Every structure is written in C-alpha cells, then in structure tokens.
Image (cartoon, rainbow, N blue to C red):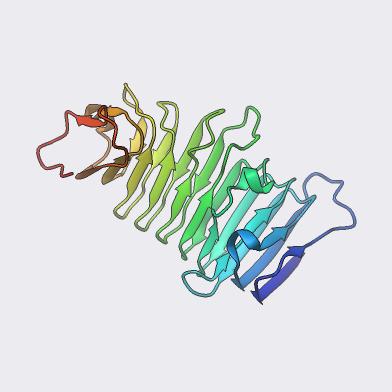
Amino acid sequence: TSFSISDSSTDHTFNFKDTSSKTDSVAFSLSNYTGGADTELIIPGIETLTITSAGGTNSNVFDLIAAAAKTLTIKGTGGFDIDATNLSTAGSTKITTIDASAASGNVAIATGALASGTTDITVTGGSGNDTLDASAHVANDSSVSGGAGNDTIVVALSVDDTVDGGTGTDMLSTTTVISEAGNITNFETLRLTANVSQDMDFLSGNTITKVVSGDNGAGVGFTDASADVVT
C-alpha cells in the first residue's frame, strides 16, 4: 500500500480499516510537503513506515505522528526534516529503528525520549549532510551512525552507546562525557554543550581536529588533546 503527497502544507491523516496484524506496513512518497511544526502527517495503526522524499534541500518539513510505528525507513533525494518537534513529543513514541541509509537528501531527525522499553534504538543516516539528534533518549543504549556526508550527531554520550560519524567531516555534540574508552568513531569535531570536561584519550577512535564549547561554564574543557586540535 502506497500514498503520495505533493505541494501541500496542510495536515494529512491516513486511517486504515484493519490494522490488527501488528505487522502492518505502508509506503509514502512526499514532495514539497512543508510547514514544519504546523503540518502534521498522522498515520495511526501502522508498525512499519517507508517514506520516499523527493524535491530540493528543504522539500519536506513536517511533524510525524505515528503512534504504532516501530520502524521508519527514509529514502530518496529530497530533504527530510522532522526535528521541529521531536518524535516522542509528536506522538511517535514507539519507534526503535530509523533507517535513512538509502536517502541522499539531507535528513534531520530528533527522537525525543522514546518509549522503547528494553529495546535499544538504532538511527542510521544517509549520504546527505544529516542532523541526527538522539540526545533526549537516555533510558537505554543508542546506536547512531551518520553514514556519508558532513553530519552532526547529537547525543547524551554514554560509554555503552555506539556512535559513528561515518565518512565526511562530522561533528559529535553532547552534554555528557565518557571516562573510559567507548564505541565512538569517525568524528572530526567535538562540541560540548554543558559545563563538562572531556579527556580526549577516551575518544582515540576519532581524528578530532577541532573542539567547540557551547557552554560558558568554568568547567568546560578538553584535556589530553593532540597538538593539532584547534578551538
């Protein structure tokens, strides 16, 4: 089952007659579906969503409300932006897998604090310049991968998380630090947005050449950074 929306900034609701199987899937094609937080795509009762995004860089900007969805797959060449309201706040609270590996447009997603139970969440970016924000999801572990492109990944860093910038020039933005080696790889820029200090020895799986402070606290710092790291 597939549907298309193009050249619209109005809310769309798709109600289905029978969603009792718990494995229902629907595909959507979007082109120039805009409006940000004022435009809602509401899809109740569907567990697996595939959305193909067409158009330009800022082609599709909306809120996704899919209360039953567990898997969201994003494809296509158009921009795909659903971070004006995070998924949890918008009502898409059960999503545990977001796969944008087949997307070449820029993808922007904020998960919020998802109700994933004991299931870790997985977020995968595509080949565009993606912004993947899983910073509010701290109930269990996160696996976030930027893929190709110059990505920004925002997390509340934990040693049990797996965070991979992928290829390109990528930024890791976090309010927390790790005090032992973790699964953090392929980042070139580290941005601290809280009054914390990171020992760079615990981020040795990266080629970080720039550190940025996003907080004015006296405790913000970067220790054991290599000589070629700039601020």
Which residue appears at 22% of the width and 32% of the height? Answer: 222
Q: Residue at x 70, y 60 (%)?
A: 41
**Lateral position of residue 152 relative to residue 23, left or right:** left
Image vertical order of residue 92 relative to residue 178, above or below: below
Q: Residue furthest left?
A: 227
Q: Is residue 143 left or right of residue 48?
A: left
Instruction: Indicate the position of residue 9 as horizontal and vertical percent values.
Output: 65, 71
Asked if residue 96 is positioned above or below residue 34 in the image, the reply reads above
Q: Which residue is drawn at the image coordinates 42% and 43% (left, top)?
A: 154
Residue 61, quarter of picture: bottom right
Number of labels in the image equals 0
Quadrant location of residue 63?
Answer: bottom right
For image coordinates 85% across by 58% down, the residue present is 16
Q: Position of residue 48 (x, y in %)?
A: 70, 51
Residue sticking out furthest to the top: 179
Looking at this view, name the residue that lies furthest to the bottom: 7
Q: Quadrant of the N terminus?
A: bottom right
Q: Quadrant of the C terminus?
A: top left
In depth, the one of 165 and 154 nearer the eye is: 154
Which residue occupies the foreground of this view, 23 or 140?
140
Q: Position of residue 140 (x, y in %)?
A: 55, 28
- View extreme (right): residue: 17
Q: Position of residue 64 (x, y in %)?
A: 65, 55
Among the 4 quarters of the image, the one containing residue 211: top left
